[in-house]
Image (cartoon, rainbow, N blue to C red):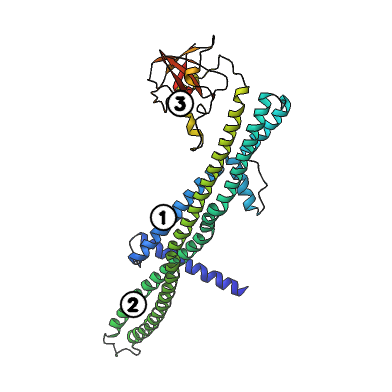
Amino acid sequence: MDFNVRKLATDAGIFFSRAVQFTEEKLGQAEKTELDTHFENLLSRADCTKNWTEKIYRQTEVLLQPNPGARIEEFLYEKLDRKVPPRPTNGEILGQFMLEAAKEFGPGTPYGSTLIKVGDCQRRLGGAEREFLQTSSISFLTPLHNFLEGDWRTISRERRLLENRRLDLDACKARLKKAKAAETKAACEGESVPDFQETRPRNYVLSASASALWNEELDKAEHELRVAQTEFDGQAEVTRLLLEGISSTHVNHLLCLCEFVEAQAMYYSQCHKYMLELQRELGSCSGDIRCPDSLDVNSHTARSPTDPSAFLPLNSASPLETDALQIEEVQPPASGTRKAKVLYDYDAADSSELSLLADELITVYTVPGMDSDWLIGERGNQKGNVPVTYLELLS
């Protein structure tokens, strides 16, 4: 118990000494040991690395999991050191709802069969998203988290210890300076001629005793300064090595970033593949579905023009080129023709298409077997395929 009390008193004394030194430095009443320029640059670089790594880590979490409630739940499981239960992605939930709806509407109906195809695609998209989230978490988020919770905490701890060593060193310098001043003053007083008429030359004896005491205090202050300087230099070297390791951290994070990009590219490639397959499946059955003549495509007016063929593989032919019908042989139906206003200029890709000029009016209609993204357009004696997204159908 006595040992603990003594240790507590010693620690309190050290803390008080550091607090006094720190306060006097802030008030400009004490000197401060400055670190070299290279060391200061290492500190600045480390702080910059920590700040930006933390921001990138937090925003990547938001990207991978936009739901704040889910992020809080994952944080709590992490703090409790428990495994996060599996959670279905939004795509998987949507796909499941579509499949269940198809059962209710009847899988043999056009709507039900289409729901089955789209729902299956959504489930595959959700599975690809789940795989992407897991890969990104392991290859990118985990290394950033390990740096913030591991390496950076070690660096911060050693930096605080270095600051304490510096305060101790500066406090020892201040004590040595005071001891030298007191020793000099005592020596000056000792050089004065004592009054030997007195029975006891009291002033002379006291001066000699004070000089001896200050010499002893000076030796003690010099010894403490040497010890503090050694501890400071050792701690500075340890901290320097840790700060120079930030370069290795950058290299590691660079590799993790490349893996994150690869995972992202693979995820979007899979999504593109699944959507192309779904588009082909829906295109093959579009001829069996009769859409009402009042189909409203005015919603396309708010979008930028997009060539429907951009959603098809590069080596595949245009849907209209695969039709056995020739444009010259197509005859307009007895009813169902409509007027349409051209929204954007369009250059025909081949002889089967009709070039368009913005704001002109043309006559359009469809024929059985045509892709839903295209119509037959007529302007005088000219006739050809035109994309729906470039038109505003008029009543």
Q: Earlier in the sequence, mark 3 or mark 1?
A: 1
Q: Which amino acid does the dot numbered 1 rest on?
A: Cys
Mark 3 to mark 1 CA distance (whole Å): 42 Å
User: Which residue, given by chain and number where applicable, does mark 1 sit on?
Assistant: 48
The answer to the question of whether label 1 and label 2 lie on touching residues, with beta carbons closer than 8 A, is no
Q: Position of residue 195 (x, y in %)?
A: 28, 87
Q: Position of residue 264 (x, y in %)?
A: 52, 46
Closer to the camera in the image, 97 or 253: 97
User: Which residue, given by chain and number where applicable, does mark 3 sit on?
Assistant: 303
- Element marked by disc 1: helix
Q: Residue at x 40, y 70 (%)?
A: 171
Q: Which amino acid does the dot numbered 2 rest on?
A: Ala
Q: Residue at x 51, y 47 (%)?
A: 58
Q: Earlier in the sequence, mark 1 or mark 2?
A: 1
Q: Is residue 133 visible?
A: yes
Q: Which amino acid does the dot numbered 3 rest on?
A: Arg
Closer to the camera in the image, 389 or 129: 389
User: Which residue, given by chain and number where applicable, does mark 2 sit on?
Assistant: 182
Q: Work out whether 82 lies above or below 33.
A: above
Closer to the camera in the image, 176 or 269: 269
Q: With 115 as the anchor, is 136 left or right in this view?
A: left
Q: Earlier in the sequence, mark 2 or mark 3?
A: 2
**Res. 124 image quadrant:** top right
Q: Position of residue 118 (x, y in %)?
A: 63, 32
